[in-house]
Amino acid sequence: MHSDLLLSFSTDMARSHGLEQAITFAVLQQFQQYRPNQKGWLTISDQEFIEKLPFWNIETIHRALNQLRVQGLIEIHQAGNTLKPNCLYRVIPSRKQQGLPIVNNVPVSTQAPNQERQQKANQGFGRASTITEQWHPDPHVVEQLTRLGIPQNFIQEAIPEFITYWLESGRSAISWGSKFQAHVRKLWAEHETKVANNRIPQPITRDWQPSEDALEILKRDGIDQQFIQDSVAEFLLYWMERGSAEVTWNNKFVSHIRHQWQKFCSTIEHSTNPTRIPKNWQPSSECYEIARLAQIDITFAKDQVKEFVLYWSETNQTSTSWNTKFVQHLKWTWAKRHQLETIGQSVNHEKTAGNHQSRNTANQSFSQRIQDTSWADDL
């Protein structure tokens, strides 16, 4: 059980820097007030932070500490880029606390003017100030932006425009570093959107395959993985013949598979009891409807039935849906035939090779042929 703790924080700071940062900053000030320290540096453990802030997890506390550092309100002494369980912290004192001379109620630094202006603009503590021509983002600000995947050159290119805009506006800010960070993030989001919108549509290629993300989406939809793989060749042949161009073929493939699977499930009846194929078996009318939708020649489809029945009769295997097996077999053989014809029509030499391969395939057993996927090597 945590005892009740009273914690006060600055509402002005919460408005300008964020609620989490204001509360965490108040805790650091408490540590500084009641604990002996060396030149303002304090060693504070994660456990001590959790005891003071039991309503947050350590990730939230670390995030607030990093933001305070970016905003120039504290310093952190650590090894590497990740906060450790025990780190040294120092609250950066305000100008009045530093004993700087005051002229017209404004603190004056004894530092060089350019150095003071740069520190003042980046740290953002004390009075709000206007931006200067020499302003440059603090390394911690740049580090935070690069962690978001924003390139260094993109960040640097945004500085002149940022300075010019705020110089012309004449407005003041407590932390120009935070303002710059928000500005660059907005620019980067607009840049990525523009790049996505300006992508040039491309026709599908023979070696196209659905992305892992597309396959994962279809898998979550409960679509049979073998059904998806069997549909790739059909999808390729259809869109290669049409010559259409798309920005991304994955979206079209996902839509195609979902439609085909819905049609497949609504037309093909599945029995719960596996049975051997009857010698007089014939595919249902729905099989031919699916073949028609896949642009498979119906005469070709009917010619496959005799060989299909003969093979599965000889294997003596059982299945809950012979219609399903027949549709999968039909798509494979149709794609195989189409691929051989395409190769045969390209060059005379390839035609001879294609005919030779076709004769060899005819001599193979039916089992070898349905397991052969060499036809898809060039797709």
Image: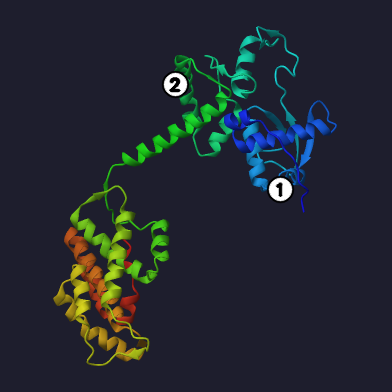
State the image coordinates of residue 30 (x, y, percent, origin top left): 77, 34
Label 1, residues with CA under 10 Å away: few <14, some 14-19, many ≥20: few
Eyeballing the image, is 225 above or below 280? Answer: above
Marked residue nearer the N-terminal end (2 or 1): 1
State the image coordinates of residue 258 (x, y, percent, origin top left): 31, 64
Query: As shown in the figure, which amino acid type bears the numbered disc 2?
Result: Glu
Could you tell me which residue is drawn at 61 percent across and 12 percent down? 114
Task: Specify the label residue 54 is tagged with.
Answer: 1
The image quadrant of residue 13 is: top right
Q: Determine whether the residue tagged by mark 1 lies in a helix, strand or loop.
A: loop
State the image coordinates of residue 316 (x, y, percent, origin top left): 35, 91
> With 64 as the anchor, is 239 left or right in this view?
left
Task: Specify the label residue 161 is tagged with.
Answer: 2
Q: Determine whether the residue tagged by mark 2 lies in a helix, strand or loop.
A: helix
The image quadrant of residue 226 is: bottom left
Which residue is most to the top?
103
Q: Please tell me which residue lies in front, 86 or 287.
A: 86
Could you tell me which residue is drawn at 55 percent across and 38 percent down? 147
Q: Quadrant of the C terminus?
A: bottom left
